[in-house]
Image (spheres, rainbow, N blue to C red):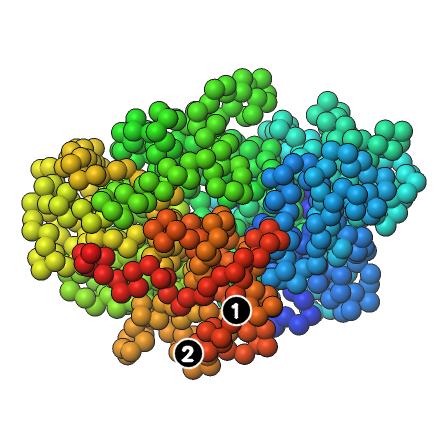
Amino acid sequence: GAIGPRGGGEGRRVWGVVPWASPGSPPLRPSAPQPALTLSPAPCSAEPGISMASLSRALRVAPPRLLWQLRPSDVEVELLAHTRRVVSHDLEEETGLHTGWIQNGGLFIASNRQRLDEYKRLMSLGKAYGVESHVLSPAETKALYPLMNVDDLYGTLYVPQDGTMDPAGTCTALSRAAAARGAQVPTTTGPCVPRSQPEGPGGPAGRAYGDVTMTRTQGPENMPNVRDHDASVYLRLQGDALSVGGYETNPIFWEEVSDKFAFGLFDLDWDVFSPHIEGAVNRVPVLEKTGVKSTVCGPESFTPDHKPLMGEAPELRGFYLGCGFNSAGMMLGGGCGQELAHWIVHGRPEKDMYSYDIRRFHPLLTDHRRWVRERSHESYAKNYSVVFPHDEPLAGRNMRTDPLHEELLARGCVFQERQGWERPGWFTPQGTAPVLQYDYYGAYGNQAHRDYAYGRLLGDEYTFDFPPHHDVIKKECLACRGAAAVFNMSYFGKFYLVGLDAKKAADWLFSADVSRPPGMTSKGPVLLSHSSSGAPLAGDGYYLAVGGAVAQHNWAHISAVLQDEKFRCQLIDSSEDLGMISVQGPASRAILQEVLDADLSNEAFPFSTHKLLRAAGHLVRAMRLSFVGELGWELHVPRPACVPVYQAVMTAGAKHGLVNAGYRAIDSLSIEKGYRHWHADLRPDDSPLEAGLAFTCKLKSDVPFLGREALEKQRAEGLRRRLLCFTVDEKVPMFGLEAIWRNGQVVGHIRRADFGFTIDKTLAYGYIRDPSGGPVSLDFVKSGDYALERMGVTYPAQAHLKSPFDPDNKRVKGIY
């Protein structure tokens, strides 16, 4: 692996650039070049020659690191499990060297109800992965950790098998293991900056990120490490002393990085760090009478979305990143190293690494200094914040807006942000709620916003219950089911695939049949990528509409395939040039019949077809499609025509009960219908057969396509897991990560959940496995009694192979 200039590098991470492969890992294919193990602690030093003596000195001052097994992401739980296995077992078994691993447990502190609810969610997810954890009362916490002040606690989460990692011991054992396998461990390194240096998203290196080790404290021996998230402080066991660290809202930006800084440290700024000491003393009062033994303060890189930067750089093929770990490099290093190694050798990781994939960012964002600075600051400042399902960033907003932005804002739109795009979330009846310029949470002399309508509405989302505007979203959904709703979906990616080999490329890329004549549309997954809609054009080409949040990743993936397969065609990005207005519901035909200059009857305009028509005098592409399970059309509109076409739709819809609706309604309506979402129900490590999408694959044809052999093998061997729909009669909110119980055993966890207002039930989708390891047959599915565990409480659930709402697909056909 390599740390490149794109990620900013982590001066304190002297080992994290190495892929960690456990002893049982498959060898690299013989034809692949064997990567050298290079310990490159600098952010790409321009000074050749970093001696092993310098490395040893750096390791001696590097403090121990913490390993927590539970995070609010199933993929990260899997990555952490790999790291723990390597550090606690595999390296020592292979080399005979002790890595310094100490299993002293971990304790998360909850000072309010929302924080304890978050910990209960983690506990339920842990059951799906076999991670032991316990929610403790304040009294139970005191018994476990006698030195702790528990007077202000709601409770804690205790994970007995969490622990402490030693950088020096781990690096030594890892180097020994790598050398024994034939890897090179050079004692000097040359410059690693390519001649043509790519630029991209890095984060500010927070100079104030540091550790303070107190003098010997009587009593904490073998006590768990502590994270007091609400005080933004952690307490780590270090021999017979405690080390204190944390994250503040005013980290010091590192503006200039010297080429000679490798292994350098800073003087600790006590004005910035003092709140962490106060938080530590509040939690363990004995520290007030304890002296300071040592301090360590070095730079740390935080990325704009608080996720690492990994994978192949799209602008420099063959250049891979593994950096920007947001102070979790050692915890995630084992799992991420394993995935990066697989990525380099096989062209893709084994797990769903989309959230870490460098291709998720659009160049319009990463080339914008203000966006990088603001978002990276917020990711640092909110490092210990509760992860709420519907939280939104306040930094780096209004970067990409479509022509309807001001029109919808005036109508009460509360916007969400997805990869720089402002898209409608829901519509408040309480007036306008614009997103204001980022205030850095009042830091650096900025005045924090007061009476901030958007911030107040966003604060209502800070709950694991139904938010106050739950009924507002309900009205949008029921209006769509009973009359009509208009959705602005302009943030979608809109691509043209054109050229001599466009048909060959589409056949290879898409699992669905794309041989339909012009005027028809196809919907299906790009295997190893994302689901999208495609429409063949009259010439040699296809029009592709893909989800805006993953559009850049789609673009990079498809472009790479075109290059690798040498198809004579090109991909043209028209995302900024076209808007997308979707009108859905029983009254949609009557409304659009007044706007479009064509017959919209079933006979003249069947489902899954498209035509070039005029709307309010403007040429638009109308597609009869739906992502909410209703009769409806999508209008793909040239940017200058978006406002007049939207206004014409609203005028025609006024007498039919047409309402504006946002993506919160789409999420509810689509899960109710059983439509799949990419990166929730569908991930790169899922197959269409497991997801119940066999009908989207042209397996009955003899047309070759990417992934066909794997699907045929899976179909022959039987499915080892299967995606199911669950309904819960009790009206409780669920968001994903809930454990799935079958006949008293945990068989999986929920990927996506929402409330279905039409059926008046909670719906959830998740993959289940047979605990015995066998195929998940239909008999296995039907013979189980199911329950979903939400924050430690189980609720009876009914399992369905398909959604119970409109199972015969009558509504999209206009049959009501």
Q: CA distance from mark 2 to mark 1?
A: 26 Å
Residue at point 63%, 70% (across, down): 25
> Element under label 2?
helix
Q: Please name the residue that numbered disc 2 is placed on.
A: 715
Whole-percent x, y for residue 515 in the image? 21, 68
Q: Please name the residue that numbered disc 1 is placed on.
A: 785
Q: How many marks?
A: 2
User: What residue occupies the far front of the structure in this picture?
Assistant: 730
Quarter of the view holding residue 102: bottom right
Q: Which mark is residue 411?
A: none
| Badge nearest the viewer, 2 or 1 | 1
Whole-percent x, y for residue 808 in the image? 27, 65
Residue 795 or residue 704, whichever sits in front: 795
In-image side of 743 versus 549 (left or right): right
In-image side of 675 versus 181 (left or right): left
User: What residue occupies the far bottom of the structure in this picture?
Assistant: 716
Residue at point 69%, 31% (across, down): 208
Upstream in the sequence, badge 2 or badge 1? 2
Residue type, label 1: Asp
Quarter of the view holding residue 683: bottom left
Residue at point 20%, 42% (across, down): 637
Q: Are marks 2 and 1 in contact (CB under 8 Å)?
A: no
Residue 735 or residue 16, whichever sits in front: 735
Q: Is residue 735 visible?
A: no
Quarter of the view holding residue 219: top right
Bin the neighbour count of mark 2 within 10 Å (Cα to Cα): few under 14, some 14-19, many 20 and up. few
Q: Is residue 655 visible?
A: yes
Location of the C terminus by quadrant is bottom left
